[in-house]
Every structure is written in C-alpha cells, then in structure tokens.
C-alpha cells in the first residue's frame, strides 16, 4: 500500500552562536509519518533526567559533500512511462530541497554499465583501432533516455554535484583478460578528458571523476598498482593540460576491505597522490565489514574526503525478492549512513535512483560482467502500467540526511549509548545544529542536550528523526 506523502516546511531562526531557543523535530516512522514537522519544542536549562544524547559543537570533524543516488538509463526509461505531470512531480520530490529530498551528490556513469538499459553495450568510441578517437561520440547520452537528458531534467528541480566513473574502456583498448593495455594508457586518458569536455559543451559539468569502477576484481582487470601509473603519468597530467575543473578520484573499490587493502597502492605513490581529490569506496557487505575499513582509510589519509559512493540490494548479492517493499527496510540503510558518517564519510551515494516494480530494466552483457538475471532495489519504484510511484524506506531515511545536512555542514560530536538508537550530529550552514537519529526499536522519550540547554524529544517506534536546534 502506498503511503500518502506530505512535505512540511518550517521557519529557520538564526540566533547568536551557542544560543538555542527551540528544537524542531521532523519524523518519518513505521506508523506512517513522512517528513512530518512537529510543533517546535522550547529549549530548557538545567540537567535533564532519563536517556540523553549530548551534542558538543566544539569537537568538529569532516565537512559534508552531500547525499544522493545514481542516474541510469533504466531510471529515465521507467520515469518516462508516467504521465508528464507525474514525471516532474517525482523529480521534484527527489531534487527540490523545499518540497522534496534535495539530493546534492549524484553519480552519472561514463558509458555502459549494468543499468544502461536503452540499448546494447556501448562506450564513447566503439570503432576498433580508432587511435585518434575520431569517432568519439556522446550521442547516446543525448537521447530521450540518455544520461545528459536525465541530468538536465533533474536540474530543473534542484542543484547537485556529479561524480562519474567507468566500468570499462572501449573493448579495442583491452587485452584478452579484459584489462587496459599499457600502450593505450595515454589514449584512455585522452578519452576520459574528451568525455569531460563533451559533457561541458552540453552544459553538464562532471565535478568528480574516478577512472575505474570496481577494478581488478570485478570489471576492468587493471591492477591497482597500474592505476597509479595511469594517473601519475597520463590521466593526471592530461587533465591538468586540458584545464578541466573536475577533481580526480582514485577509483571505486567494490567494498571497504578491498579499498583498505588496495587503494594504498595508489595513494602512497606521491606521483599519483598529487592529483587525487577524493577517496571512494563502496558499501557492499557492510554487515560483515562494518564501517571500520572506511574509518581506517580516513585516518590514514585525513586530508582527503572519503565517500561511500555505491551500495544497493541486488539479486546477485542478496537472497531476497527485488525490489524491497516497506518503510521498515529503511532502518538498515539509516544505521549504515550514521555509521559511515561517524567513521568519517563526507559523501554517501546509493546506486539506482529509480527502477520499475521488477527491479529493472537492466543491460545484459555477460562478457562485461552484466548477467541475465539482475534485478536490484532502487530508492524509488515506478510502476508505469499502474502509474504509481513508491518511495522506499531507503529513500526516506536518506532524504532526512540530504534535506537537512547540506553541503558544507560539519560533523560534530554526539554521545549517549542508547540501545537500538544510532545518532550523528552536524553544525549546519546558517548557524543551526542538526541531530539525525535512527530509532530501531520501540517508541521512547529522550533529551537532546547541548551546552546548558536541552529539549525533550519523542522517538516513534522504528523511525528516522531529525532534530534541528535553532
């Protein structure tokens, strides 16, 4: 059953530093609340009793880059099955900050990947042996279901930065093991820069670029140590010569353990390190690996922002029906987001933004690692035949972060070990303080304490709660 959605706005009062007059509480819950703003709660002085979460603005940690998901051809194909007004309403609820989730950090892959579903496998130059890249073209991305089209439509409703990556170079640059041939390193560097330049000509700036998605073990079989050579001798210098503003990322490891074991081969190379602006790792197998490998990477390279840049449910990984219905599933994602942010993450990106009621459509290209049976779980489920849009639990939990923890916010300390409760706090642009709370258990009443003031807050059962101190 679909839950009626109502977004509520509320006034923000900017007060002098360390003066908090009231707490605004915004709730999404198993009971049916969706971003419901409760009446403001006045701050009190003194010492509260019972369970307390304490916020310490003096302890400051990483700056936040944003939250979001991924543009895919599959998503736009599904969205386009809806009536025009419903298409725009869906995009507004995702990207508009005032009337929606306000996503601020999006992924847009370069060329084909498993949900490039509006045709067969493609890269931007599939002419064999085109050494001078004369046949380079982004024409597919300009089509009605293309990524540039998707990005421009989303931008009518909100503002966001874009991170990009690629599964494979053109096939003719690969060896028999599906790895990039060394003689094509310079050519692949020019290929990627050309991609950035052609998108810019279309009015779309790629803000961040990771040259490979899940390399060595999953997709392109280039080794991490060889990526260091590619970056320091070819891609980094080529981007610098071209004068592109895009920030270079290392590559995207397919989980945190693999990232901890392998990204060092690039980041500890001074020649490669000079070009790197961000570390990106995926969140698969989080229950077993936890956020500790991400934390260790952040501690080893504290000058580089680190992101969780892809995660989802997928049939090839998770033994459950796809997509996953129901608000309650959001609890898992909420706990993961809190855990990653507490470990030092500056950005958090889910995989598919929109898919259909069957978890598709998807691209089949088994030679590139894209299987025949590959349903996955999106943030938004669109049933085109019924004209219905369902915002999943994962969407609502992530929306609390994207809407209220904007780019430029700084994580600050929060403490208080409460069973079944996870929390993380931020100093937000404009002077307010934001506390994000995931309550995985029964309803409970807590106190949120900051300096000499506190406010009592009720956490509904199985809920995501934002507390904004103004």
Image (cartoon, rainbow, N blue to C red):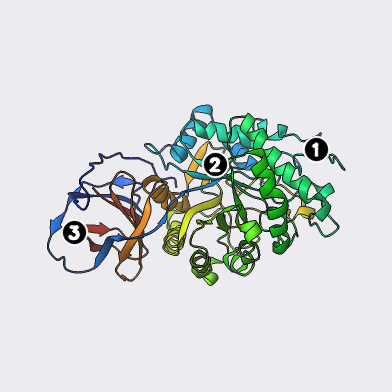
Is residue 432 toward the left or the right of residue 147 in the image?
left
Tell me how far mark 2 sits from mark 3, CA to CA: 42 Å
Counting residues from the N terminus, which is met first, the one under dot 2 or under dot 3?
Answer: 2
- Numbered tag placed on residue 133 in the rendering: 1
Question: Which SS class for mark 1?
Answer: loop
- Contact, mark 2 vs mark 3 (Cβ under 8 Å): no
Question: Which SS class for mark 3?
Answer: strand
Residue with the most extreme top position: 84
Binning the other alpha carbons within 10 Å of mark 2 as few (below 14), some (14 to 19) or many (20 upward) gives: many
Residue 437 visible? The answer is no
Please name whichever residue, 446 or 107, is drawn nearer the observer in this view of the structure: 107
Please name whichever residue, 113 or 292, is drawn nearer the observer in this view of the structure: 292
Answer above or below: position of 48 versus 355.
Answer: below
Tell me how far mark 1 sits from mark 2, CA to CA: 38 Å
Is residue 249 toward the left or the right of residue 446 in the image?
right
- Numbered tag placed on residue 382 in the rendering: 2
Q: Quadrant of residue 361?
A: top right
- Numbered tag placed on residue 454 in the rendering: 3
Tell me how far mark 1 sits from mark 3, CA to CA: 63 Å
Q: Which is more foreground, mark 2 or mark 3?
A: 3
Answer above or below: position of 97 versus 376.
Answer: above
Is residue 30 toward the left or the right of residue 155 in the image?
left
Question: Which SS class for mark 2?
Answer: strand
Answer above or below: position of 316 versus 395.
Answer: below
Residue 445: percent from left, percent from top: 23, 62
């Amino acid at each position: 059953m679909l839950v009626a959605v109502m977004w509520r706005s509320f006034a923000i009062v900017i007060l002098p530093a360390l003066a908090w007059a009231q707490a605004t509480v915004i709730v999404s819950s198993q009971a049916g609340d969706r971003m419901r703003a409760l009446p403001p709660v006045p701050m009190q002085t003194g010492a509260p009793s019972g369970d307390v979460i304490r916020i310490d603005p003096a302890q400051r940690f990483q700056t936040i880059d944003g939250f979001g998901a991924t543009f895919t051809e599959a998503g736009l194909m599904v969205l386009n099955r809806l009536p025009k007004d419903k298409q725009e309403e869906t995009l507004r609820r995702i990207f508009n900050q005032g009337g929606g989730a306000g996503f601020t950090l999006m992924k847009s892959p370069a060329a084909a990947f498993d949900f490039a579903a509006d045709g067969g496998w493609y890269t931007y130059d599939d002419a064999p042996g085109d050494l001078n890249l004369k046949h380079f073209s982004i024409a597919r991305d300009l089509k009605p279901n293309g990524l540039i089209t998707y990005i421009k439509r989303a931008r009518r409703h909100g503002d966001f930065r874009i991170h990009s990556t690629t599964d494979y170079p053109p096939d003719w640059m690969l060896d028999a093991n599906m790895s990039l041939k060394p003689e094509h390193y310079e050519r692949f560097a020019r290929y990627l820069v050309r991609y950035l330049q052609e998108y810019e000509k279309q009015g779309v700036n790629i803000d961040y670029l990771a040259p490979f998605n899940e390399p060595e073990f999953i997709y392109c079989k280039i080794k991490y140590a060889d990526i260091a050579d590619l970056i320091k001798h070819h891609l980094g210098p080529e981007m610098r010569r071209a004068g592109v503003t895009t920030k270079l990322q290392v590559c995207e490891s397919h989980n945190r353990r693999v990232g901890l074991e392998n990204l060092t081969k690039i980041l500890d190379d001074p020649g490669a390190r000079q070009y790197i602006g961000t570390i990106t790792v995926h969140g698969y197998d989080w229950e077993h690996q936890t956020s500790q490998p991400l934390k260790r990477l952040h501690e080893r390279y504290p000058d580089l922002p680190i992101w969780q840049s892809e995660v989802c449910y997928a049939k090839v990984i998770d033994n459950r029906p796809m997509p996953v219905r129901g608000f309650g599933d959001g609890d898992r994602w909420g706990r993961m987001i809190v855990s990653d942010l507490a470990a030092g993450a500056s950005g958090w990106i889910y995989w598919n933004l929109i898919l259909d009621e069957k978890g598709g459509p998807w691209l089949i290209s088994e030679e590139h690692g894209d299987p025949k049976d590959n349903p996955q779980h999106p943030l938004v489920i669109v049933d085109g035949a019924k004209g219905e849009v369902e915002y999943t639990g994962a969407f609502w939990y992530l929306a609390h972060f994207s809407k209220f923890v904007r780019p430029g916010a700084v994580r600050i300390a929060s403490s208080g070990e409460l069973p079944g409760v996870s929390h993380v706090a931020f100093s937000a642009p404009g002077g307010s303080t934001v506390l994000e709370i995931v309550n995985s258990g029964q309803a409970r009443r807590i106190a949120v304490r900051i300096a000499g003031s506190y406010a009592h807050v009720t956490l509904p059962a199985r809920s995501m709660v934002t507390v904004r101190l103004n």
